[in-house]
Amino acid sequence: MPELSRLPWHMIIKTSSNHSLKNLKADQLDNVKSINECEEHKKELTLFCKPCNILLCSDCAGKSHRMHNYQNLTLLIQTRKKTLLTRTASLKSRISVLKNTEELVQQEENVYHKHCNIAKKDIIAHAASVKDVFCNTIDILANKSLATIDNIKKMDIKAIDTYLNEIETEQLSLAGLIKTTEDYINSSADKQFMDDFFTIGSHLDKVLTNTRRSLASLNNLKFKSGEFNEAIIEQLFGELDNSTRENVITPLYQKLPMPAIFPIAKVEDKFTLSDDIIDIVAANEDNMWIFTNNLVSLYNRSGVVSSTFTPPVNSKRMLRKSADELWFWTGQSAVKRVNTQFQDGYKVPFEGGLVGCFIQNGNLLVYNMDEEVFYEVTEQEGVRNKIKIEDPTEKLPNNDIFTGTNILMAETSNSNLVFSSQSNIVVIADKHGTILETFERPGASFRGITLDNYGQILVVDYEKDCIDILSEDGVFHRNLVNNENGDKMIYSTTHFTLDECGFLWVFDYVKVMTIFSWQ
């Protein structure tokens, strides 16, 4: 039997002769029910957790997500539908503007015909009045000017027809986009809608920010002539004056108020530390482990320390395997704290390794600068694999990927590797080391990389004072935080990361920790 998912619906029914339509409908209802029901608590999914990007039931919200920012799913969907509908309303407004523009163009065309006829009549009248003197020369010059008008008119009418066609095409395109969006809003499943919301909204915003090309120009024909003199017949007959009117008609789109798709980053808390930070990793909920020179402290968002301990000797980096399991890289191995003791693991057969990050299977990536490869190391068994960074499509400007003493690294949900060595480029490679994409900014110095639960990559630029959001594949999405308005929200950031509640912790060179809400 052919695979049912590849067959059209009527073929599925025909092929599945041993199954009744009633059973198929029952299966579909069960699937819908399972989609809208919490697997753990068997309750309806009525809430949406913003930092985790998942649907919740009431029991989930009251237990594992009680500290998170979650919202009523129905109200959130209604709000987001209204957000998209305001954009379709703006598109409808554009259609109205285009229709008015079409009428103006048609009026302009009528006026243009009149101007052309007047110019032609002027030439004919002038030619008749001096014909006895100019004789054949007048006829030649008159016919030449008439032909010029016809040629110019032909080009202008062609430009007008082209512009009208473009307007008609634009109207049809916008109408199609409106219908597609409204159909999608009215018929899509909640989860599908939540997954596609930002993509659809961004596309509608992109259409709305597109300005319509104007009817660039039309020739303004006017006949000029001088006094008659037989000695200079050709000069005195006159010539066609062709001056161009710029921007004859431009559609004027009304800017309608629209709710933003993406929330704006807002400062929630701020406190100052006494020492520089070596590393910062998320603990439980909205707490954060902060590693300074000789101390590891557990901070909350208000800057209050609830516990501290001394890290292992010669610790160079602190890494998070889970909220309660911290490892410290010492150059050739990692050490974790078990009660009051330290346990060694993740050893590599070389010194001076640059530690990367833990990956989904629990192994640790360590870069060997001499071999220019990543070692994948298990906790107790040692080296499991080597990953060579390859650039077959030559996306890198040079081969010196790791030029610093630290590697900023993270693994995405689809097992891609994101890394930088505090340079002006962020590299995205697959799990085998093949470079897929790069994000480069001249003069930048990327000092932090972190991931959210929406499959997005957040990077912070120390030099440009901005935080950017990239897609999971490294494509630039938008700028989250910058100082363009002169408010100095961040300044020379050296470290940043996300806590489990979705708050963004940003540490600058003057030792100020700023916590942002942004989801």
Image: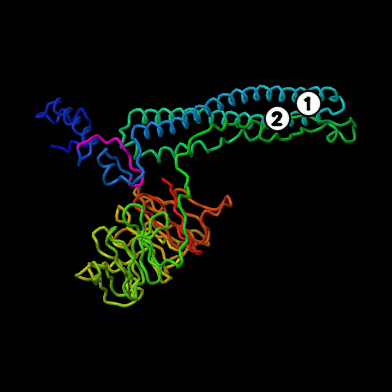
The quadrant in which the N terminus is found is top left
Which label's residue is closer to the chain start, 2 or 1? Answer: 1
Q: Which residues are magenta?
A: 42-52
The amino acid at mark 1 is Ile
How many numbered discs?
A: 2
Residue 179: % across, % down: 41, 27
Question: Is 366 placed left or right of 81 in the picture?
Answer: left
Residue 291: % across, % down: 38, 66
Labelled disc at residue 123? 1
Question: Is 197 placed left or right of 150 in the picture?
Answer: left
On the question of residue 4 being in view, the answer is yes
Up-down: is 327 above or below 264?
below
Extreme-left residue of the structure: 18
Q: Is residue 49 magenta?
A: yes
Labelled disc at residue 144? none
Question: Is 500 placed left or right of 171 in the picture?
Answer: left
The amino acid at mark 2 is Ile
Residue at 44% over, 33% down = 83
On the question of residue 173 being in view, the answer is no
Residue at 77% over, 30% down = 140
Up-down: is 178 above or below 367?
above
Q: Is residue 131 magenta?
A: no
Q: Secondary structure at mark 1?
A: helix
What residue does disc 2 label? Answer: 149
As measured in the structure, the alpha-carbon distance from the residue carrying label 2 to the one carrying label 1 is 11 Å
Which quadrant would residue 407 be assigned to in this image? bottom left
* In-front residue for pair 7/270: 270
Characterize the local packing of mark 1: few (<14), some (14-19) or many (20 or more) Cα atoms within 10 angstroms: many
Residue at 43% over, 31% down = 82
| Colour option used | rainbow
Q: Main secondary structure of the magenta part?
A: loop
Residue 35: % across, % down: 24, 36
